Image (cartoon, rainbow, N blue to C red):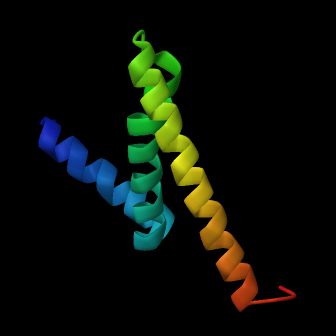
Amino acid sequence: MRFIDATRRSIGFVIDTFTPLGTIFLVVFMLLYVGVVLPAVWSQHSYRRSAASRMLDLLMRHMHQVLRAVRRQFPGQ
């Protein structure tokens, strides 16, 4: 089996399992994890760790603000 066929089959499986919206969330999560969390933990360079840590902090603060706004829109749920 060629690599491209295996990739298409894997992507089809993920979309069937998680629905298109779930797949988008999964891809965004993986990009954030690989691009922000792993460098914050595994980098040997302190400037990369600190930059990734600041970015993670910024993303978490914005996510908190978004969730607060959603809770205000739908009180009691």
Residue 26 locus on image (x, y percent): 46, 55
Q: Image height check: is 6 above or below 46?
A: below
Task: Return the residue found at the far top.
Answer: 44
Examine the image and state in which quarter residue 39 appears. Answer: top left
Task: Return the residue found at the far right.
Answer: 76
Q: What residue do we see at 15% from left, 36% from top?
A: 3
Residue 1 locus on image (x, y percent): 16, 36
Q: Is residue 27 left or right of residue 2?
A: right
Q: Image height check: is 4 above or below 69?
A: above
Q: Quadrant of the C terminus?
A: bottom right
Q: Image height check: is 34 above or below 47?
A: below
Q: 33 and 43: which one is in front? A: 43
Q: What residue do we see at 70% from left, 90% from top?
A: 73
Q: Image height check: is 21 above or below 14?
A: below
Residue 68 locus on image (x, y percent): 71, 74
Q: What residue do we see at 48% from left, 17% from top?
A: 42
Residue 36 locus on image (x, y percent): 44, 37
Q: 10 and 37: which one is in front? A: 37
Q: What residue do we see at 27% from left, 51% from top?
A: 9
Q: 38 and 58: which one is in front? A: 58
Q: 35 and 12: which one is in front? A: 35
Q: Is residue 25 left or right of residue 71?
A: left
Tell how many labels: 0
